[in-house]
Image (cartoon, helix red, strand yellow):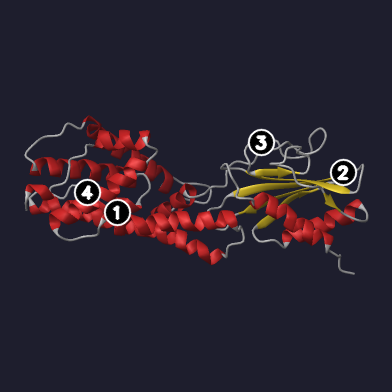
Amino acid sequence: MSSQSLGKPRPLWQVITLSLVTGLVYYGYYKWIIQDELRAYTGRGWSGALSLLPFLLGVTVPPALAWFDPDVPPWFSWFFLGGIVWIYIVQFRLYCTVNRLYQDLGHKPPLTVWWLFVPGLNVVVGLQQIHCLSQFWAMQRQTTIADPIAKALPALFAASLMLVLGVTVLPTPAQATPLVQAPVLAAGSLFSFAGDRPETLGIQTGGLAACPQSPNCVSTQSTDKQHRVEPLQYDGPLDAAIAQLKTIIEGLPRAEVLEVTDDYLYAEFTSSLMGFVDDVEFYLDPTEPVIQARSASRLGESDMGVNRKRIENIRKKLNGFSLPG
């Protein structure tokens, strides 16, 4: 193998620093380029494009479509899950390749590949992979690469192991969580985007809470064009209007009514793909026959018009609604 096919040593401290500075953009580049370098060196394996593009498409396209249409069918979320599964496969193959490189030199395989599937230890084996691949390229180039951060890997492994044992072995009120469940629980928490329920929910002085400056909120009590939506109209007594609203919302996809009073209703709407939660409130103004409404996303900046579309959809259903009997 010629020197032109050798990869570039990238020490752990450099990968971590550049990844943090660039908001993980460099880390994506790193994962892409090392696949091409390994393919050029070994003559086999997947390219950077084949390794990264299915993952990027899987985790970005479905959520992007969900912004435009919150009623994307639930089965569409399998594309997102497919992207996650794909990157695990890529990582597994990469770790096996690094081990094989060391074995070909007569060394002991440096990576414990199955750590990939254990929360906590997967971070350690990922950092070890970066360090070991850098050292391999350095050995092939007959040079040395200083990597002071790599010295902390044994301590990080010990801390991660204690965390894993604490999460998966220590008794809980429902008894100890089996070890096999740990990756599932951790993945669920890692890809949950529900956010915290705002403390400003409920009827405030003068009505509902004001929208924040971000555009992912609409309110009938806002005065600016960006957030303003017209109040909902209704006929009949307050209790009938509340009953109508409750029935309508309970019939909408991924909606849950959490609080209902004589003049107030609060519900949560959860997106199908990534679990984003929107807080939706309705307040029946006692001074006139209108319903004040507020729909706001907990996380992010733009909502691609989802909150406004939701209120208009409920308005349409309310205008054509009739209670049975």
Residue drawn 24% across the image and 59% down it: 46
Which residue in the protein does label 2 denote? 285
- The residue most toward the bottom is 325
Q: On the image, numbered disc 4 is attached to which residue?
A: 111
Tell me which residue sits at (23%, 35%) in the image.
150
- Label of residue 214 in the image: none
Labelled pair 1, 2 in contact (Cβ < 8 Å): no
Q: Amino acid at mark 1?
A: Gln
Label 2 – label 3 distance at C-alpha: 22 Å
Q: Mark 1 to mark 4: distance in Å? A: 12 Å
Q: Quadrant of the C terminus?
A: bottom right
Location of residue 10 in the rendering, given as x and y in whole percent from the top left corner: 21, 39
Query: How many residues crowd mark 4 within 10 Å: few (<14), some (14–19), many (20+)?
Result: some
Based on the displayed image, in which of its 4 quarters is residue 207 positioned?
top right
Q: Is residue 183 left or right of residue 250?
A: left
SS at mark 2? loop
CA separation in Å, label 2 and label 4: 64 Å
Q: In this figure, which residue is indicated by the disc labeled 3? A: 212
* Residue on which disc 1 sits: 91
Callout 1: helix, strand or loop? Answer: helix
- Label 2: few (<14), some (14–19) or many (≥20) C-alpha neighbours in 10 Å: some
Q: Nearer the viewer, residue 264 or 30?
A: 30
